[in-house]
Image: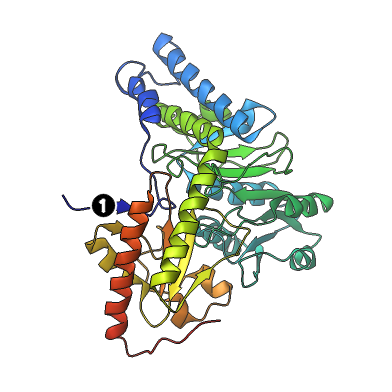
Amino acid sequence: MERKIYLDNASTTYVSNEVLNEMIPCFNTIYGNAGSLHSFGRDAVAIIDRARDRVKDAINASKANEIYFTSGGTEADNWAILGVARANVNKGKHIITSKIEHHAVLHACQQLEKEGFEVTYLPVDENGLVSLPDLLHAIRKDTTLISIMTVNNEVGTIQNIKAIAKIAHDYGIYFHTDAVQAIGHVKMDVQDMEIDLMSMSSHKIHGPKGVGALYIKNGVRIDNITYGGQDQERGKRAGTENVPGIAGFGKAIEIAVRNQLVNNRKLKNIRDYFLEKLKEKVEFFQINGHPHQKSNAILNISFYGIEGESVMMLLDLAGICVSTASACTSKSLLPSHVLQAMGVPDEIAQGSIRISFGTNISKSDVDYVVDEIQKVVAKLRAISPIQPGRLN
């Protein structure tokens, strides 16, 4: 049987058995519409309420009614950016974000620019960190929202979210963070971190696709971006509730937070072992992202003198699944906007792959992957017109 090793967990994860078991009754036993007043509908509402409590507890929200279920992280990001900006237009039309955000944030900001808003896109340093002095310099009297992601989805760098949120509040500005890649890897306490809005997604933490949530602190002024339902999600988000998905997400986030410490240790051990073996067998590569302040699950590697897409495709033939960037942009031939913002030259950025580990990866798997990377890199460099040189 062909060996298959999945190293694209930042793109999506498998649904765990515990989560699947939580969902199955919602398909064929408790299948009522949560908007219905009869017993089937009330049973569905009870499942949603339980999931809402689980999400609340996982992020230490003050109340369960601060959790709003969405179709995923993209909708949550869109809602946070568009909803807050439009609801607070009387105060100002200036938004601050960073150049390395997920496109769900960047494209929402571009839409606001079409509507007459101004957006400041903060630069990052060579490690992918936003500068606090740069943030302070960008703040204006008409700034209404700051949105900075917690963990970057391509290089894994972790931002100084608590400090950024405090700065925002010192100036009376709402703060939103995209925590899609953070849940299960970084402790997210919305009260301690002073977060006003936070986006989450289920399928990054062994839950189902098509469901996520937006945490909205009580008192935050935000407009709806979907219309059609009077009562769904307390009148804030129209659409029949995805009861199976919501049930699965609730269970998945409960498990992810419960096992976070143990899983982080496993991921760090696997990542460190991988790097040790890679350095033994492959020359002329660099690791992109912060050397210490980063997720244990994400590793972005640039191999000098070759194309990352070619590395990815040849590894796929060997049964190894990696990516070249975010899953939402991996089909683009353009260099990663994240690596460009970090100052990585295009010729090096083009040679990048993203490896995102899961806790089910063994040292034997790592040995196989490194051996195959060694073969692939050697094969591609043999036909490359660019001679590799040692990188700083």
Towards the viewer: 82 or 65 = 65
User: Whole-percent x and y of residue 105?
Assistant: 55, 56
Circle 1 sits on which residue?
Answer: 4
Residue 132 is left or right of residue 322, and the answer is right
Residue 126 falls left or right of residue 306: right
Disc 1 marks which amino acid?
Lys
Tell me the element at label 1.
loop
Q: How many marks?
A: 1
For residue 108, above or below residue 358 = below
Q: Is residue 253 left or right of residue 312?
A: right
- Residue placed furthest toward the front: 280
Q: Nearer the viewer, residue 220 or 307?
A: 307
**Residue drawn where x is 58% and y is 25% of the image:** 53
Quarter-of-image position of residue 323? bottom left
Q: Give the percent coordinates (x, y) of residue 293.
A: 63, 58
- As displayed, is residue 132 above or below residue 234? below
Q: Nearer the viewer, residue 113 or 353?
A: 353
